Image (cartoon, rainbow, N blue to C red):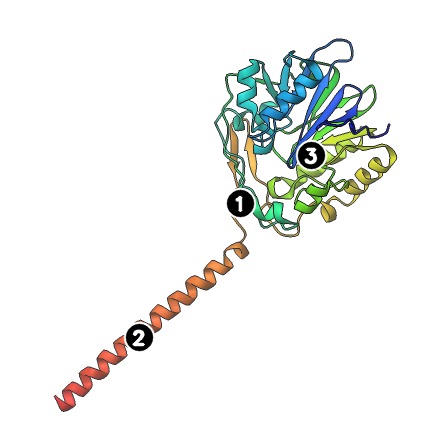
């Protein structure tokens, strides 16, 4: 299978595989999938807050005025649910997510805080600015069925691929081995603005600055590798295909802790812990993150102590002189 980027003049989306299309908005991807045997379709993820007009335009171009049967979420991070509430309300369709992802899209729990100390580029450095509090679309949310089927899509199944988030999922079409991996792994270096702009193709681990459980992330990459996909489309980067892609994915799995896991960061030695109600525990920030503040605070304390001692010494000297010459 070869990549089929839509090259028609004026098109702003790309073809991933038969009846599967994707669109990039700034740095994140959304997907639309149509059933092979009817006109029904679903939206996978809902991009940024500014993505709604582009999503509507793409839907109109592909499907006319036919609304989707559902919206499927790979996960609920801010760059995947930005236009969710607006579109779910406008289309009046259900939104499906894994049950472990529900607290973050029903207003019940924030995600673990982003980690700007992981390095790798400006996208990571700016992570302290990224929203991680929950949205609330409870009136539209439905838990995905336990049999791993994908509502509204025949021939597809979902897999629970946690690590990047507790309820992260990926979608797979067995017939031609098309995989929509979400952010379980990505096809460009998500931490680098330059890689995002250039859309440099490279199989990488999940975005480091928003991944709080690296052991689970490693297991999820292994699970997806075992599918032997022919085509992969991810939350960041262009689709990749065939032997070259599988070779890179295998290399990522074999060297996950060298290639994917950052050498520094809040979640390196200890993962965040979550359950059906949301986040239970977040590891403290590493001490080295506070070192600059400690140095400054210590300097101020030493300076203040020195001034106080000098002041006391001067007062004592004045009292002595006063006693002698007073």
22 relative to 107 in the view: left or right: right
Q: Foreground residue, 25 or 292?
A: 25
Whole-number angstrom distance, CA of label 3 to CA of label 2: 58 Å
Mark 2–mark 1 CB contact (< 8 Å): no
Residue 158: x and y in percent read 70, 22
Position above or below: 206 against 155: below
Q: Mark 3 falls on what kind of element? A: loop
Whole-number angstrom distance, CA of label 2 to CA of label 1: 40 Å
Quadrant where the N terminus is found in the figure = top right
Q: Residue at x 52, y 43 (%)?
A: 129
Kindly report which numbered mark, 3 or 2, lies closer to the viewer in this rendering: 3
Q: Which residue is mark 3?
A: 184
Mark 3 vs 2, N-terminal side: 3
Kindly report which numbered mark, 2 or 1, lies closer to the viewer in this rendering: 1
Q: Mark 2 falls on what kind of element? A: helix
Q: Which residue is mark 1?
A: 128
Residue 287: x and y in percent read 52, 55
Q: Residue at x 22, y 78 (%)?
A: 315
Q: Residues within 10 Å of mark 3 (few under 14, many from 20)?
A: many
Residue 19 got which mark? none
Q: Residues within 10 Å of mark 1 (few under 14, many from 20)?
A: some
Q: Mark 1 falls on what kind of element? A: helix
Whole-number angstrom distance, CA of label 3 to CA of label 1: 21 Å
Residue 309 got which mark? 2
């Amino acid at each position: 299978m070869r990549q089929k980027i839509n090259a028609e003049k004026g098109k702003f989306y790309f073809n991933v595989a038969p009846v599967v299309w994707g669109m990039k908005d700034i740095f994140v991807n959304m997907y639309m999938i149509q059933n092979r045997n009817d006109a029904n379709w679903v939206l996978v993820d809902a991009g940024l807050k500014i993505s709604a007009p582009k999503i509507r335009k793409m839907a109109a171009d592909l499907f006319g005025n036919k609304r989707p049967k559902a919206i499927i979420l790979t996960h609920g991070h801010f760059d995947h649910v930005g236009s969710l509430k607006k579109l779910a309300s406008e289309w009046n369709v259900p939104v499906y997510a894994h049950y472990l992802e529900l607290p973050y899209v029903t207003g019940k729990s924030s995600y673990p805080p982003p980690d700007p100390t992981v390095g790798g580029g400006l996208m990571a450095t700016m992570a302290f600015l990224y929203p991680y509090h929950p949205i609330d679309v409870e009136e539209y949310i439905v838990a995905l069925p336990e049999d791993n089927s994908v509502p509204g899509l025949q021939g597809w199944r979902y897999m629970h691929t946690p690590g990047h988030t507790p309820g992260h999922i990926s979608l797979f079409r067995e017939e031609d081995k098309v995989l929509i991996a979400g952010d379980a792994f990505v096809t460009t270096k998500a931490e680098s603005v330059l890689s995002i702009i250039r859309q440099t193709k490279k199989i990488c681990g999940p975005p480091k600055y928003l991944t709080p459980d690296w052991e689970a992330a490693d297991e999820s990459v292994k699970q997806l590798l075992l599918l032997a996909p022919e085509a992969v489309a991810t939350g960041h980067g262009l689709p990749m295909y065939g032997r070259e892609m599988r070779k890179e994915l295998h290399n990522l799995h074999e060297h996950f802790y060298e290639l994917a896991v950052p050498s520094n960061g809040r979640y390196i030695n200890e993962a965040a812990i979550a359950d059906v109600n949301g986040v239970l525990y977040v590891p403290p920030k590493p001490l080295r993150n506070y070192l600059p503040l400690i140095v400054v605070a210590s300097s101020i304390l030493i300076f203040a102590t020195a001034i106080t001692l000098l002041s006391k010494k001067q007062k004592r000297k004045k009292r002595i002189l006063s006693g002698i010459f007073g």
